[in-house]
Amino acid sequence: MKLWDKGISIDKKIEKFTVGNDRELDLFLTEYDITASKAHAKMLGKIEILTSDEVELILVELNKLQTQVDDGSFVIEEDFEDVHSKIEFELTKTLGDTGKKIHTARSRNDQVLVAMQLYFKANLSEIYSKTENLIDVLLDLANKHQNKLLPGYTHLQVAMPSSFGLWFSAYAEIMIDDLYLLQAGLKIVDQNPLGSAAGYGSSFPIDREFTTKELGFKTLKYNVVAAQMSRGKCERTVTSNIASLANTLSRFSMDICLYMSQNFDFISFPDELTTGSSIMPHKKNPDVFELIRGKCNKLQAIANEMILITNNLPSGYHRDFQLIKENSIYAVENIKEILDVFIHSIALIKVKDINMQDEKYKYLFTVDSINDLVIQGKSFREAYKDIGGQVENGTYIPAHIKKHTHIGSKDNLALDLIAKKKDL
């Protein structure tokens, strides 16, 4: 069954090509299409296209379909092009002509739009919550290990003294920026497109403000052409926001992989979180974080791909948009799994004691040595040359580890202030 079926048969090869994997993807959207159909039916009743009895019958059947979704028995057979045709078929099978009326004043275009945006709303909120949880875990780790020193690096060269507290809270605070982007994404998708139909509205006196309130959207995408143009823009925004978070997690994973290696040996994880080698019995590989790194890099690539698919499309609907459904659902579902695994794994991290007197960390303290000379009265440039000369001729003796008292430094992490930024 196809919503656009006019009784003309279509080439099977073309049908397979155009349908693609919509049936599988639409299982992620089923509950949202049901929700939107309920609101649409109620609205049709309000404007007296449907009788109150017809509305009630449709709602009963839609609730039955939702029960199937909840218990996992709902399927979209190969006879159907997508979830929208499946739901309409089920309504028609049970209710006859009453079921056929559900498509009045809407198009598959705005059905997809509203289902996708409800899906994005629900899942961006879930991603936001999971990211908040990860930030809280990192701030707890920063507090727990704030006094444990860690070498700081620039260009992967020993640079200045850092701490595990500084490292954990750095990723926590930079991840708050990702929360802000997720908030922006939520604002964009929280606009009701239902009622735009095929992109140019309807001659029926539909009540779009009613469905906006019924579906819990914050506002309405008023202009029907703008509503249709939000197809692609919403997906680009969501995948771009996810890509930013993925970038943060990928960089964090790279740090973890480095710090677990024997050459650094700063951290470890329980054996059950690592894997071994088929021929080297000593190996404890950070496969989890390597896979997170790779998956996150793939999510960043998807964001670029979304731009390339949609960047030169004129206004109105185009079938190209079918291709971005898969990418956006893939991005949403994968970042949720990545966050779950990251939260579970990072909470089990084992932080090691590092001997900062080791010869290889000798030059961590050159800046502190320069600052000592400045306090004694030398200009910074003169002090820099003095310590630089000592380094060159091999006479440099490291200074004692000093407290860094300014806000945001290793000895003044401002964890409470970072935590407050989540609520801005």
Image (cartoon, rainbow, N blue to C red):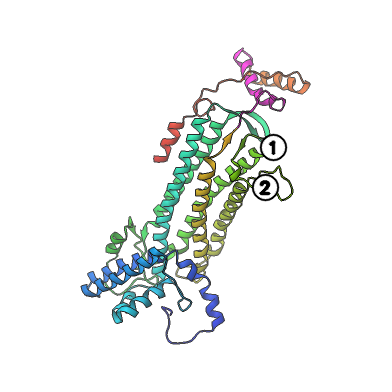
Give the percent coordinates (x, y) of residue 176.
47, 42
Per the rendering, the mark at residue 262 is: 1
- Of 384 and 50, which appears nearest the observer? 50
Q: Dot 1, how many residues are within 10 Å of its Cα: few (below 14), some (14-19), or many (20+)? A: few
Name the residue at 32% across, 61% down: 215
Cα distance between the residues tagged 1 and 2:
15 Å
Residue topped by disc 2: 276
Name which residue type carries label 1. Gln
Label 1–label 2 contact, CB within 8 A: no
Residue 49 drawn above or below residue 296 = below
Give the percent coordinates (x, y) of residue 226.
40, 63
**Mark nearer the viewer, 1 or 2:** 2
Instruction: Please tell me whether mark 1 sits on a helix, a strand or a loop.
Output: loop
Residue 126 drawn above or below residue 157 = below
- Of 82 and 370, which appears nearest the observer? 82
Q: Which residues are magenta?
A: 352-378
